[in-house]
């Protein structure tokens, strides 16, 4: 499947501004349009006075104009459209991604910042980013941290051949940005603590299975992207970290 337009959300936060600039560059590299959405949940407008609802819409349009201008500065030839979403953020972005014009065989990509207004700086992902990644049926990019060079290394997590879709997306991203691709497969002792006696053999077998699956994926990627530098790595995740993940409650990987 080819790559289609890019949809990005903005709320006026610094994280959203970085996400919009990343999305603009990505859309330009794809030679695809950029669609910017500011969601204000106007379906709740009956709870607001007419004057308040009008000011909310005006503020959203102002944020969209600023984001569109910044995107145009980043990529002058980029086609940029904007939209005030009437639903909550996640729903607005999902609806926009399904509605934006694109070829039948092209996948739209949604881009969000890691945290929006009022987010806690220590959190890896905000609630919107996490929910978006869990609900979308298209690729979702979460932009976090400071702006980085457009080239370098693209790292993708791999379990087995079931992850080929994500790996091919990462490979296409690496190719387009003139970067290399690293396949990263992780394992942890926490899966084998139930019985200590056979633990060594179980771990050895699991690591070998991980390595074999990663190598099969590597072969598929090299066939799909023959000119791309691809490496693979199987690593052990510290059990203390994995234990925290295991007790963190429901999550989306």
Image (cartoon, rainbow, N blue to C red):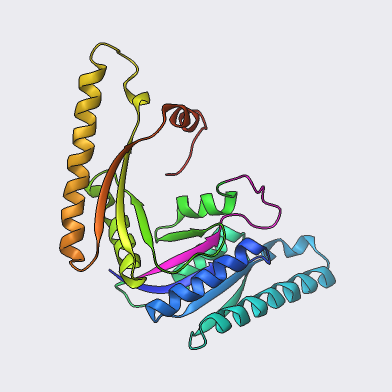
The N terminus lies in quadrant: bottom left
- Determine the residue positioned at 40% across, 77% down: 29
Q: Report x, y in % for residue 158.
A: 30, 47
Q: Say if 160 sits above or below 34 in the image.
A: above
The C terminus lies in quadrant: top left
- Determine the residue positioned at 76% across, 63% down: 46
Magenta stretch bounds: 107-123
Q: Does residue 189 appear to the left or right of 40 in the view shown?
A: left
Q: Report x, y in % for residue 44.
A: 71, 61
Q: Report x, y in % for residue 117.
A: 69, 57
Residue farthest along the top direction in this orientation: 197
Q: Does residue 90 appear to the left or right of 28 in the view shown?
A: right
Q: Is residue 94 within the magenta segment?
A: no
Q: Is residue 188 visible?
A: yes
Q: Is residue 101 visible?
A: no
- Determine the residue positioned at 21% across, 40% down: 211
- Determine the residue positioned at 30% across, 12% down: 196
């Amino acid at each position: 499947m080819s790559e289609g337009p890019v949809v990005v959300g903005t709320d006026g936060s610094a994280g959203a501004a970085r996400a919009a600039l990343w999305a603009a560059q990505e859309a330009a590299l794809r030679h695809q349009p950029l669609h910017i959405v500011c969601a204000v949940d106007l379906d709740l407008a009956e709870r607001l006075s007419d004057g308040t609802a009008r000011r909310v819409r005006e503020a959203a349009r102002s944020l969209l104009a600023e984001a569109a201008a910044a995107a145009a500065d980043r990529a002058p030839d980029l086609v940029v459209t904007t939209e005030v979403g009437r639903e909550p953020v996640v729903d607005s972005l999902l609806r926009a991604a399904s509605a934006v014009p694109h070829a039948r065989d092209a996948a739209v990509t949604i881009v969000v910042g890691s945290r929006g207004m009022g987010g806690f700086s220590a959190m890896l992902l905000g609630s919107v980013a996490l929910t978006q990644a869990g609900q979308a049926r298209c690729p979702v990019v979460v932009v976090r941290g400071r702006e980085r060079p457009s080239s370098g290394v693209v790292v993708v997590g791999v379990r087995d051949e079931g992850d080929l879709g994500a790996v091919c997306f990462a490979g296409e991203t690496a190719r387009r940005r003139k970067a290399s691709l690293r396949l990263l497969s992780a394992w942890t002792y926490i899966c084998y603590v139930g019985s200590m006696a056979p633990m060594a053999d179980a771990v050895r077998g699991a690591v070998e299975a991980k390595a074999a699956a990663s190598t099969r994926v590597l072969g598929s990627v090299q066939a799909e992207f023959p000119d791309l530098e691809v490496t693979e790595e199987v690593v052990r995740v510290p059990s203390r970290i994995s234990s925290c993940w295991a007790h963190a409650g429901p999550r989306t990987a």
